[in-house]
């Protein structure tokens, strides 16, 4: 039995689907059973548990051949009480249930001690779970390619998109969530001892200018990428609905300076198979059939 957290989202969902497709038994940890119905119809068991409920998580993790751990979407960007409560519950549940192995979704840059912004909870995840006496693997993923979906509407309507990444020709590690999920499912079925770090990015790196060019071809119109000046970040982010821009700004500063990168560098990362244009093409197909 493999236990998957976050199965109603992209990475956890792909992990669960990959395992189910190969005939593995899967139990998904869900806070809202209605959102898990699709996977339940595919044969997955459902374990109801809040991410800060150590007792319920222990029950969900018990007798597992492997557990896929990820923090809830929207986790605070710093060392908050909410983050600490979830991490404490996860550590307690894993130490008590003692699954055969644990695979955790982490992030590029999580090895850094500071100046991480939104990535801070994933650094804390590695710190909190890293010394458990279990086979542990932390998958540090690059920027999700699916985050580029937010640019499609403004590009199609106005031909103008903005970026906080600078300079716009500098390439960064990006990866499709389908490749992360497949890697997680594969790793859950492997044997190892101790602590592993697996860093993953796509088949190539992409710059903001590359995204604009891909959208131009897809939309059949010119798309202009404009970099937001650093002194305008806070106003722009607040106008887009970000109540507390500071963690996101700190993360962006880290990316632009090169502080946030893979610990093993470009050569040390696993390369996914899915290019950015394929991920964007899937969005257009889904939109037409929705």
Image (spheres, rainbow, N blue to C red):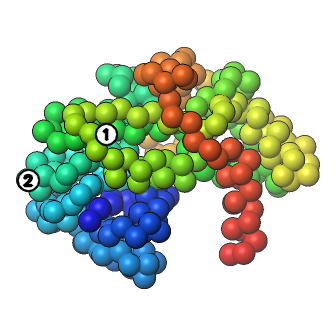
Give me the C-alpha separation between circle 1 and circle 2: 18 Å
**In-image side of 267 versus 42 (left or right):** right
Q: Is residue 71 visible?
A: no
Of 212 and 177, the residue lying toward us = 177
Of 239 and 16, the residue lying toward us = 16
Residue 118 percent across, percent down from the top left: 42, 37
Q: Is residue 152 visible?
A: yes
Which residue is located at x 21 percent, y 45 percent?
Answer: 87
Which residue is located at x 11 percent, y 56 percent?
Answer: 97
Task: Name the quarter where the N terminus is drawn.
Answer: bottom left
Residue 257's image quarter? top right
Location of residue 66 with respect to 35 vertically, above or below? above
Residue bearing the label numbered 1: 137
- Mark 1 or 2: in front is 1
**In-image side of 75 versus 278 (left or right):** left
Disc assigned to residue 96 = 2
Disc assigned to residue 204 = none
Element assignment for label 1: strand
Location of residue 149 with respect to 58 vertically, above or below? above
Residue 193's image quarter? top left
Residue 90 percent across, percent down from the top left: 19, 50
Label 2: few (<14), some (14–19) or many (≥20) C-alpha neighbours in 10 Å:
some
Residue 130 percent across, percent down from the top left: 21, 34
**Mark closest to the chain's N terminus, 1 or 2:** 2
């Amino acid at each position: 039995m493999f236990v998957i957290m976050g199965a109603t989202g992209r990475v956890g969902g792909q992990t669960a689907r990959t395992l189910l497709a190969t005939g593995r038994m899967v139990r998904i940890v869900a806070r809202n059973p209605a959102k898990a119905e699709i996977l339940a119809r595919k044969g997955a068991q459902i374990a109801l548990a809040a991410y800060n409920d150590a007792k319920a998580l222990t029950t969900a993790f018990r007798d597992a051949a492997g557990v896929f751990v990820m923090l809830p979407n929207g986790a605070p960007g710093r060392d908050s009480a909410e983050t600490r409560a979830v991490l404490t519950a996860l550590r307690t549940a894993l130490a008590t249930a003692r699954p055969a192995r644990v695979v955790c979704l982490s992030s590029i840059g999580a090895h850094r001690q500071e100046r991480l912004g939104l990535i801070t909870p994933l650094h804390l995840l590695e710190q909190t779970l890293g010394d458990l006496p279990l086979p542990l693997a932390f998958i540090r993923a690059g920027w999700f390619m699916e985050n580029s979906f937010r640019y499609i509407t403004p590009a199609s309507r106005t031909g103008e998109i903005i970026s906080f990444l600078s300079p716009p020709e500098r390439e960064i590690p990006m990866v499709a969530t389908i490749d992360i999920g497949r890697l997680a499912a594969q790793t859950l079925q492997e044997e190892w001892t101790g602590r592993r770090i697996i860093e993953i990015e796509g088949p190539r790196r992409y710059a903001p200018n590359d995204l604009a060019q891909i959208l131009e071809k897809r939309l059949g119109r010119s798309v202009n990428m404009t970099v937001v000046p650093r002194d305008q970040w806070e106003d722009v982010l607040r106008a887009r609905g970000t109540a507390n821009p500071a963690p996101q700004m700190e993360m962006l500063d880290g990316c632009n300076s090169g502080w946030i990168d893979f610990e093993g560098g470009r050569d040390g990362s696993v390369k996914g198979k899915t290019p950015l244009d394929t991920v964007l093409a899937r969005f257009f197909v889904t939109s037409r059939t929705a």
